[in-house]
């Protein structure tokens, strides 16, 4: 909802429709300890952390809508992904622009769906322009808001470098180090150019 965050939206729903019993699930890039409990205290039913894994999402549907055949793993179990191939794999992945192996893993190998999601992400790339414009205008509240959105969306699609630079920008705002952000704008643009190129090659 324009002007409302998830907490305010939940508050309005709970107050306006006190008998509304359908679950409200937070979906956010915040993965800090205690955040799930905070969401529930605010009236939400559960919590999902980005980047999303399809088994985790299906397990949540199973939990609240009784579709036991959709997934066998509980959200809490699936939310802690196993580390495969050791630290070397994780370190290598951090340098990837488009980690298609990880992206496909999240979607259980569904290449067509992954390509469609990447294509849609390209179509909505105006967020990058918006973020750069907010940086030029020194609108730090909006910078943090847009950077947070990009961080989560990019992470869900395994666009690692883009998610990382967005995370750094958001963190800089939160830590009051806004003097560092203008220099990050060039890195953001460069990273987006690389990301766009890799996506276009992958979805052809």
Image: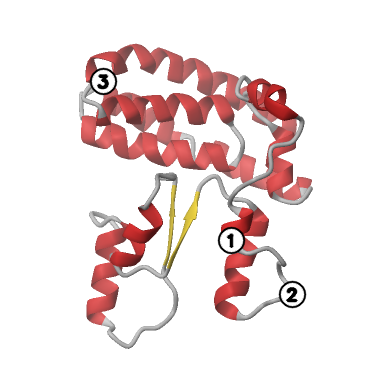
* Residue 30 image point, x, y percent: 40, 45
Residue 88 at what x, y percent from top left? 71, 22
Residue carrying label 2: 69
Residue 56, compared with residue 152, is above or below; it is below
Who's the residue at 62% across and 19% down the image? 95
The residue carrying pointer 2 sits among few (fewer than 14), some (14 to 19) or many (20 or more) residues within 10 Å by Cα, namely: few
Q: CA distance from mark 1 to mark 3?
A: 40 Å
Quarter placement of the N terminus: bottom left
Q: Is residue 25 above or below residue 123?
A: below
Identify the residue position indicated by label 1 in the image.
75
Distance in Å between CA atoms under marks 1 and 2: 14 Å
Q: Which residue is mark 3?
A: 136
Q: Nearer the viewer, residue 25 or 129?
A: 25
- Which quadrant is home to the C terminus? top right
135 versus 152 height, above or below: above
Where is residue 201 drawn, in percent x and y? Answer: 72, 27
Secondary structure at numbered mark 1 = helix
Q: Position of residue 126 (x, y in %)?
A: 43, 35
Disc 3 from disc 2: Cα separation: 50 Å
Viewer-side label of 3, 2: 2
- Identify the residue shown where x is 76% and y is 48%: 112
Q: Are marks 1 and 2 in contact (CB under 8 Å)?
A: no
């Amino acid at each position: 909802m324009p002007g409302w965050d998830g907490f305010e939206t939940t508050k309005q729903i709970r107050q306006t429709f006190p008998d509304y019993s359908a679950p409200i699930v937070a979906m956010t890039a915040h993965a800090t300890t205690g955040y799930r409990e905070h969401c529930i205290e605010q009236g939400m039913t559960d919590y999902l952390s980005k980047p999303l894994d399809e088994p985790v999402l299906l397990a949540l549907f199973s939990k609240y809508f009784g579709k036991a055949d959709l997934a066998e793993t509980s959200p809490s179990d699936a939310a802690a992904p196993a580390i495969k191939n050791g630290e070397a794999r994780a370190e290598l992945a951090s340098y990837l622009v488009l980690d298609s192996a990880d992206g496909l893993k999240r979607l259980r190998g569904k290449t067509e769906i992954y390509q469609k999601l990447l294509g849609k992400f390209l179509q909505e790339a105006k967020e990058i322009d918006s973020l750069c414009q907010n940086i030029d205008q020194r609108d730090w509240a909006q910078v943090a808001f847009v950077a947070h959105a990009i961080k989560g969306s990019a992470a869900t699609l395994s666009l690692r470098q883009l998610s990382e630079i967005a995370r750094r920008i958001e963190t800089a705002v939160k830590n009051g180090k806004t003097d560092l952000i203008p220099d990050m704008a060039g890195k953001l643009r460069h990273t987006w150019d690389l990301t766009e190129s890799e996506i276009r090659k992958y979805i052809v």
